[in-house]
Structure formats: C-alpha cells, structure tokens
Amino acid sequence: LFVAEGEKVIRRAITAGYPARSLLLTRDTLTGLDDLASGFPGPVYVVSPEIARELTGYRVHRGALASMRRRPLPPAADVVAGARRIVVLEDIVDHTNVGAIFRCVAALGFDAVVLAPRCADPLYRRAVRVSMGAVFAVPYARLDDWREGLRDLRADGFRLLALTPAPDAAPIGEVLAGLVPGTRLALLLGAEGDGLSARWLGQADLCVRIPMSRGVDSLNVASAAAVACYVLAGSA
C-alpha cells in the first residue's frame, strides 16, 4: 500500500490506474470534495480535523488521504526501452529530494527515472506529495544490481553523464553543444553530501558540472536536477 495526500495527488493516482482502497476526509473539506467522495471506488471515512490529526500524528493540511494499492514495478530494461533522456538516482534517501526530482523530470520532458536499490521510495507519502503526483506520470524502475547496472544502460546505447561539483568536470552547457543529435542520455545524480560513488563516477562516460559563482560549491540535488534537465532537454 501507499498513501496519497491531497485532492490533486489522489485524483492523479486514480487517473494513473492505481487501485484505490479507502479515503479519509476531514469534515471541513467534504463540501469541496463531493465529487471525489461520491465517485470513490472504496469506503470513505469523514472525521473532524482533530480526529484526523490523532489518527495520523500530524495535521492533515490538505484534508484528504487515500490508501492506494501499489502496482508491480517493471524491469528497468522495459522502462528505458523507448526512452531518450533518463535520470538515474544513486542512493538518494531523502524522500523530499526524490519527489522533487520526479517533478523536474516530468516538467522538463525526460522520459523515465531509474533508481539504485537503496534509493528512497517514490511512493512514500512525502515523496508523492512533493512531486505533486508526478511519480504517477513518470515511468520508473529499480536496478537489480548497483555494481553493474550502469553497464546495462550503456549497452542499451545511453551516454552516461555524471553530475558532480568537481572543478575538473566539464561545464554541462559545453557538453550539450558537442552532442551528436539523437544521442541517448542518462543523467546520474548522487545523494546530498557524498554525491555519486567513486564506482559510478568511474563508470560514467563524462563528468559534468553546473558552473557556480560567489563561492557556492554546489546546489541541492533537486535544484541541480532541475538545472541539468533543463539544459539537456535542449538536445532532445
């Protein structure tokens, strides 16, 4: 199971085909969500905001929570089969960052996300909420093998670009200018702090960076993903 929070996210989950299990609404939001409640395929529970907070342990700001059933994840090879631009996340364990990256991927026209085995769950409640439901729109899969998973992507024809703040990495805009039209790209992103592992940096075809000013050495990984995806989208 997973929990979708907020009207927009719940509607997007249902539209994407995730089976709905049950719906919890606070009484003060019921009037505005009549159509969602009346058309919901499972039981609907209406409670006061105080009871909702007691049940969940936090204030339910958006007034609606839905319990949804997961769907089996497809193999990574199936997810990237028709893709030209993908993002690959290595061990990003912060759910907020994962959700924000999915939103960037969806907004900037990338085709899919591939997760290393230890990455945070995109269907964790906070990741879903931060993504504004983009996790339901972007195909994604997990690698079975962290050590050799990139080898399979390269065999599928992807050029692996490792995003890093290292000063000897190539400015990402210059890389874009030199790409052959039609090149399939996989943008590799690592966790906050440590960044990409030495193994993944070593397996990349090219290390790229976002040029920085005023002594700033790097951006939050979600912000960096947005910049990099925007730049690389121009090569699609």
Image (cartoon, rainbow, N blue to C red):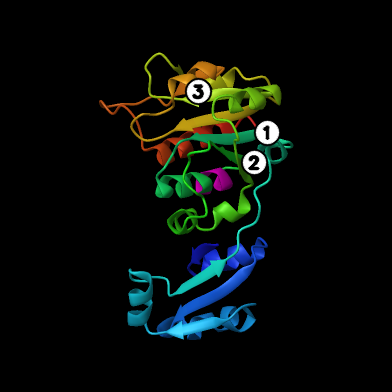
First reached walking from the N terminus: tag 3 or tag 2: 2
Q: Viewed as shown, does residue 110 lie left or right of 117? A: right
First reached walking from the N terminus: tag 3 or tag 1: 1
The answer to whether one can see residue 110 in this image is no
* Residues at marks 3 and 1, CA–CA distance in whole angstroms: 20 Å
The answer to whether one can see residue 162 in this image is yes
Q: Which residues are magenta?
A: 103-107
Residue at image location 37% in from the left, 16% down from the top:
167
| Position above or below: 23 against 211 | below
Q: Disc 3 marks which residue? A: 200
| Residue 162 position within the rendered picture, expressed as x and y whole percent measured from the top left | 50, 24
Circles 1 and 2, Cβ within 8 Å, touching? The answer is yes
Q: Is residue 104 magenta?
A: yes
Q: Disc 2 marks which residue? A: 111
| Position above or below: 33 against 181 | below
Q: Viewed as shown, does residue 194 lie left or right of 127? A: left
> Residue 60, located in which quarter of the rendered image?
bottom left
Quadrant where the N terminus lies? bottom right
| Residue 117 position within the rendered picture, expressed as x and y whole percent measured from the top left | 53, 38
Residue 84 shows which numbered tag? 1
* Residues at marks 3 and 2, CA–CA distance in whole angstroms: 21 Å
Residue at image location 64% in from the left, 80% down from the top:
39
Amino acid marked by disc 2: Asp
